[in-house]
Image: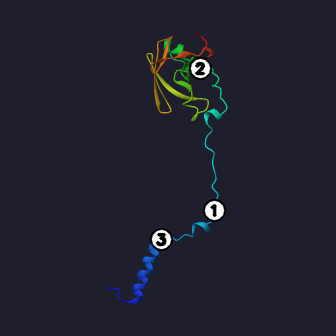
């Protein structure tokens, strides 16, 4: 089909013009556009701006949640510190960890699962793996010796 007719040429030009306007836009000039207020949301407070959250109160676990291994049993209920990281072994499977790395995400610390196998402990906190070794008296966390937190109550029977 040939576009010899004037009407066909006008229609074709109109389509091209409409297509160009769609591509480049045909909005109002910037200075006459109505300003839309932008709601500002405050981000999370910095850890230094938050009120200090005390660690959870330790309650000895039920006998069913205590480990059968006597060396592992000594670990349950104890709290340890390496640099600014503090860890408390809640029962045979759970640990509570708090420190500057956890505060932005979990004020007051985070409770996670750990695996104990013949003195070797593995856990993962916020995507970071930790390897611990417990011999019944000394705990190392990622190869660094941990210091026992003296005010941590011991479970009954120890």
- Left or right: residue 118 compared with residue 105: left
Q: Would you name the residue on which mark 3 appears?
A: 22
Q: Quadrant of residue 35?
A: bottom right
Name the residue at the right extreme.
51
Q: Is 96 rendered above or below residue 2?
A: above
Pointers 3 and 2 in contact (C-beta within 8 Å): no
Name the residue at the left extreme.
1
Name the residue at the bottom extreme.
5
Secondary element at tag 1? loop
Secondary element at tag 2? loop
Q: Would you name the residue on which mark 2 appears?
A: 62
Q: Would you name the residue on which mark 1 appears?
A: 35
Q: Quadrant of the C terminus?
A: top right
Mark pair 1, 3: CA separation: 23 Å
Q: In the image, what residue occupies the spot 63% across and 15% down?
A: 151
First in sequence, mark 1 or 2: give its number.
1
* Labels in figure, total: 3
Q: Residues within 10 Å of mark 3 (few under 14, many from 20)?
A: few
Pointers 1 and 3 in contact (C-beta within 8 Å): no
Q: Residues within 10 Å of mark 1 (few under 14, many from 20)?
A: few
Q: In this figure, which colouring scheme has been used for the structure?
A: rainbow
Q: Is 9 rendered above or below residue 106?
A: below
Mark pair 1, 2: CA separation: 62 Å
Secondary element at tag 3? helix
* 40, 62: nearer the viewer: 40
């Amino acid at each position: 089909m040939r576009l010899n007719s004037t009407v066909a040429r006008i229609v074709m030009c109109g389509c091209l013009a409409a297509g160009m306007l769609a591509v480049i836009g045909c909005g109002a000039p910037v200075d006459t556009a109505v300003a839309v207020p932008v709601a500002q949301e405050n981000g999370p407070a910095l850890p230094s701006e938050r009120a200090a959250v005390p660690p959870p109160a330790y309650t000895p676990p039920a006998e069913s949640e205590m480990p059968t291994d006597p060396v592992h049993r000594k670990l349950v209920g104890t709290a340890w510190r390496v640099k600014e990281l503090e860890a408390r072994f809640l029962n045979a499977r759970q640990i509570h960890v708090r420190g500057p790395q956890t505060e932005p995400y979990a004020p007051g610390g985070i409770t996670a699962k750990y695996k104990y196998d013949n003195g070797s402990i593995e856990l993962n906190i916020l995507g970071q793996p930790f390897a611990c070794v417990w011999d019944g008296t000394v705990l190392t966390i990622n190869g660094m010796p941990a210091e026992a937190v003296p005010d941590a109550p011991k479970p009954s029977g120890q």
